[in-house]
């Protein structure tokens, strides 16, 4: 019997279920029509599940978005009664942020999580409204997020995971100062450090410089996944 079970598992090496993904997220993945995880998803999801910081490097189109959104949603849904922003995804452009926002809502469809997009070029008052409803996850561009943080004095001390998506672009576009100001608001000192996930197609020198900064990526609890 045990042998049969093992054999059965072996025939499904790539299945999302084998990655230990929760049922309500599996359902959403099924609805998207994904049959198998991509290589970066197979490698990165279990490491993000473990709580370590992760640097995920893989070419454009390899499925990095779901690789960080799936474990982000699972982590926050597991104790969803906490109030306040607990997850942040930083995107370099408005278009990417809005696309990621839509994707996050699809993947979180069967959860109780609330998600808001904070991007430039959209109505400020609507965004203030969205923020006043205490969303669990923010999908944001750096400039607009920082603007709202300054204006509303919103706290980021409950953030459990922060994702820097398309990190090479974030730095090419000159967002380093805004990112520093956002990071300065994350839990620090004896508060639990937010788990950091950084995604990039290339490990540019500006990304490396960012990684070497104190307090962003933990020195002894980080794994690089490179494909
Ligand atoms: P990256 O961020 O690495 O450039 P994306 O996350 O944008 O890649 O994914 C690229 C495309 O692949 C998207 O259209 C996405 O819906 C699709 N995709 C992601 N994961 C899977 C999967 N497991 N099965 C099928 N399609 C997938
Ligand atoms: Mg991407």
Image (spheres, rainbow, N blue to C red):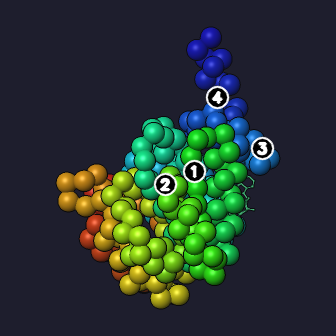
Name the element at disc 2: loop
Quadrant of the image occupied by residue 15: top right
**Farthest residue toward the left?**
190
Q: Position of residue 203 (x, y in %)?
A: 48, 76
Do the residues bearing badges 2 and 1 touch, measured as CB atoms within 8 Å? yes
Q: Is residue 215 visible?
A: yes
Name the residue located 35 percent from the left edge and 77 percent from the top edge. Answer: 181
**Residue that carries the numbered disc 2 in the rendered image:** 134
Give residue 9's mark: 4
Could you tell me how far apart the alpha carbons at marks 2 and 1 are, in whole angstroms?
A: 8 Å
Name the element at disc 3: helix
Q: Residues within 10 Å of mark 4 (few under 14, many from 20)?
A: few
Q: Residues within 10 Å of mark 1 (few under 14, many from 20)?
A: some
**Residue that carries the numbered disc 1 in the rendered image:** 114
Give residue 31's mark: 3
The residue lying toward the viewer, choosing from 37 and 194, is 194
Q: Earlier in the sequence, mark 1 or mark 3?
A: 3
Q: Earlier in the sequence, mark 3 or mark 4?
A: 4
Could you tell me how far apart the alpha carbons at marks 3 and 4 are, in whole angstroms?
A: 23 Å
């Amino acid at each position: 019997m045990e042998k049969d079970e093992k054999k059965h598992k072996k025939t499904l090496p790539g299945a999302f279920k084998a990655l230990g993904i929760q049922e309500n997220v599996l359902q959403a993945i099924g609805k998207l029509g994904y049959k198998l995880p991509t290589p970066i998803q197979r490698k990165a999801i279990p490491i993000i599940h473990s709580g370590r910081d992760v640097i995920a490097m893989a070419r454009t189109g390899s499925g990095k978005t779901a690789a960080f959104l799936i474990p982000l949603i699972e982590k926050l849904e597991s104790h969803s009664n906490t109030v306040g922003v607990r997850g942040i995804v930083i995107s370099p452009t408005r278009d990417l942020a809005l696309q990621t926002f839509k994707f996050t809502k699809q993947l979180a469809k069967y959860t109780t999580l609330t998600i808001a997009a904070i991007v430039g070029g959209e109505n400020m008052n609507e965004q203030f409204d969205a923020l006043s409803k205490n969303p669990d996850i923010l999908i944001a561009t750096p400039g607009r997020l920082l603007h709202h943080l300054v204006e509303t004095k919103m706290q980021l001390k409950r953030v459990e995971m922060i994702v820097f998506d398309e990190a090479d672009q974030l730095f090419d576009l000159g967002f380093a100062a805004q990112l520093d100001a956002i990071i300065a608001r994350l839990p620090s000192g004896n508060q639990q450090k937010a788990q950091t996930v950084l995604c990039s197609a290339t490990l540019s020198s500006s990304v490396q410089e960012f990684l070497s900064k104190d307090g962003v990526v933990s020195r002894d609890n980080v794994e690089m996944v490179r494909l």
